[in-house]
Image (spheres, helix red, strand yellow):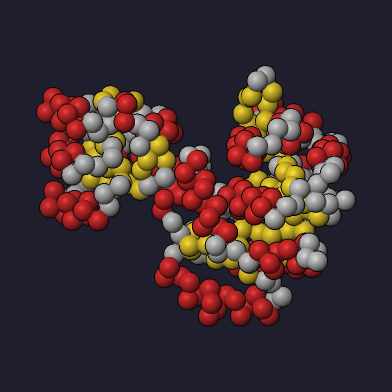
Amino acid sequence: MPAGLYIGGTTGFAGKNLLALALAMSFQEEGYRVGFMKPVGFMPRELEQQMGDEDAVFIQDALGFNAEPDLVTPVLFDEKFKTKSLTQGCSGLMASIREAYHTLSQGKDLMLICGSGSFLHAGKYCDVAGLEVAQTLQAKVILVDRFFKEFYYDYLVHSKELLGEDMIGAVFNCVPEARQDEIRELIVPLFQRRNIRLLGSIPDDQRLNSLKIKDLAGRLQGKIISAPQKTDHLVDDFLIGTMQVENFMTHFRKRRNSAVIVGGDRSDLQLVALEGRCPCLILTGNLYPNDLILSRSDALQIPLIVVREDTYTVAKEMEKVLDSSKFREPSLIDYGVKLVKSNLDLAALKTGLGLEA
């Protein structure tokens, strides 16, 4: 049997997909035959009359793999499955995962098993949370902890207690520069006392949170009313235009690649943002701009998106969208993989997997 590595996360959107891609490419470059599966999926997607997990399909495509979607993700939590599992219970799921793993691992040196959501919790009601899957497949585990205002070191310590030597280590992701000292001076000593190896600390990089303007409009259920041909451009942040023009300009100069969220009736801020060449304007309250704003938008080729909700609601939703944005652009994939590889202790990981000669 090949070595098995389960990539789990302390939360959803921790960075498991990017880490899986970086590891797969790194091991392939060293000549290892790598297989991939995502046993439990929560993002159903129809593909040529088959259902699969969106992230699993993306990773397979990026790696040039072509296994059947239902083999890569044998347990898919779509609406039909959720209804049935909640009303009739779950049975036979782990057996399906075990069988798929056995098939996919044939002829491989290493199997990468990508988790969904929280390692300890997602799928727990059907007994297919990451912990149960990893233990059933006798896979080693690394856990990704993305920085969301704090580090979840309690979660990592608890997971280590449950997994023992099967947990190779942890990876911190999206770490602000100001928090690197905290990791070195406080968390690493804590981990050393708990026999947890820190395999990497990947810095926060706003570029990886970039999203196409047209995808952003879709996620916000907005209508693009100008410059639709420019909606392939990327935005990586947002700025709320609810202040006086002078204060807005101060913030805007520092965050040029930010989508500007502004009330549909604030033509003063809209004009400033357009003349400052913001990537796009999101007009809230289902209010359309006046003719001056529309004509300047067309002339400057800056998309306008009209959304129904108020500015506060849109800003909160925008925060969620960027936190959960999926890097899909080839240039972002290459950039993200290089970033991870340059901040990951691959040698320690290989040793934990027993792949060192």
Looking at the image, which residue sits at the far top?
49
Residue 279 image position (x, y, % from top left): 28, 40
Against 188, is 273 above or below?
above
Residue 132 image position (x, y, % from top left): 79, 51
Against 251, is 70 above or below?
above
Residue 150 image position (x, y, % from top left): 50, 64
Look at 49% across and 51% down and name the residue there.
335
Residue 103 seen: yes
Side (left or right) of 232 relative to 281:
right
Look at 31% across and 26% down and name the residue there.
228
Number of callouts = 0
Look at 81% across and 46% down and name the residue there.
108
Side (left or right) of 77 relative to 285:
right
Look at 63% across and 24% down and name the residue there.
46
Image-quadrant location for residue 126: top right
Against 61, is 170 above or below?
below
Side (left or right) of 73 relative to 307:
right
Picture quarter with the C terminus: bottom right
Which of 131 and 295 lies nearest the eye of the viewer? 295
Residue 21 image position (x, y, % from top left): 62, 48
Against 348, is 26 above or below?
above
Residue 134 seen: no
Which of 249 and 329 lies nearest the eye of the viewer? 329
